[in-house]
Amino acid sequence: MVTDTTDINIEGHAVVADIGGTNARFCRINLATFELDRIQVFACADYPTLNDVMEAYRDEQEVALEHVAIAIACPVDSDQIDMTNHHWQFSIRGVRKSMGLKTFIVLNDFAAAAMSLVTLEPHELKQIGGGKVDPNAPKAVLGAGTGLGVGHLVKMPDGTVMPLPGEGGHVDWAPTNEKEWAIHRFIANRFGRVSAERVLSGPGLETLYLALADYHGRNVVPLSAAKIGQRALSGIDTLAVETVNQFFASLGSFAGNLALTLNTYGGVYVAGGVVPKLMGLMSTSNFRARFEHKGRFCKVAEAIPCFVITADYAGLRGVGQYLKQTLQQSKKSKL
């Protein structure tokens, strides 16, 4: 997280955004009530730079851009930002200066996803196995979209929470059976290294479809992730169904690894654009079985609950929550 500001102790409204490799979601936030309004979604490919899409939001929604906080799909550890799955590059200080902003906060998109967990209501979560949530224990969040995002949330002694962003989506993908080794070889021949993101993302779903076709000796026309999902949900394409089932099996293994990495008795939360659209097939897949298949630590994995986030614009709420906490901490430091 990087903050560039002259005075962050502000009132009124701010603008927050959640920017992925495909879409940029913007809204206005009331800093007193933290209600969101004037939500607008832009296709990143339609705008040459971040400044261009910010100006489009300002002009179309007729809002002032003074205090802005954005979450973005890439590491945020310096002034220079280079998106992982899109071409935008920018300097945080440069954007603040060129746009005339008083405040500009940039955080990783899955730091924002982690922060959103404290804003979610029970009806905005669908539990997939496991026991009860320990509210004081670490939480993990992952999400498949254009890429594979990962983050954690830990509770601090003073009651605040700290998001822990990372690049867990780029760890090695681990095959567990003969079919998955065949998939691994197919992807390795195409890309070299096989990361989890090569399988667990929208593009990964497309690659899985082709890999499974190759495994079965079939010639198929490449399909988009959306088309594969549609054909799987309708049941008209057995290869699409197998692809989605393989996706969920591998996602379960990956989510279970996250659960063990930080003993996330606070839960593992699945966000992103892919999974909510395929919920109809998740319950019949091997997701939870693979989540719990952890050898001597099966009992630990079995106790950890997993949830799918069904809330709209959770990322925007997470950015708002991070901004709120930053403001509160800034105010306390001045007392």
Image (cartoon, helix red, strand yellow):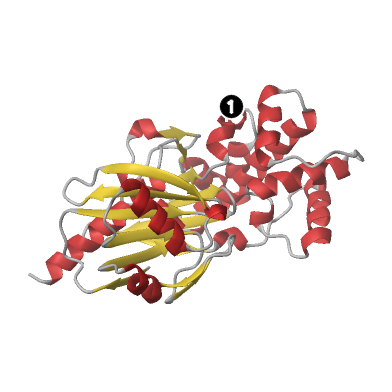
Pointer 1 residue: 280
* 81 horizontally vs 223: left or right: left
Residue placed most toward the observer, 22 or 74: 22
Image quadrant in which the C terminus is located: bottom left
Is residue 81 in view?
Answer: yes
Image coords of residue 51 (percent x, y): 43, 63
As helix, strand or loop, the secondary structure at mark 1 comes to helix
Give the percent coordinates (x, y) of residue 301: 52, 46
The answer to whether any part of residue 156 appears in the image is no
Residue ID at (38%, 54%):
17
Name above or below for residue 80 compared with residue 131.
below
Is disc 1 surrounded by few (<14), some (14 to 19) or many (20+) residues within 10 Å?
A: few
- State the residue lying farthest toward the right: 217
Quadrant placement of the N terminus:
bottom left
Q: Is residue 245 left or right of residue 331?
A: right
Q: Is residue 205 left or right of residue 160?
A: right
For residue 282, above or below residue 91: above
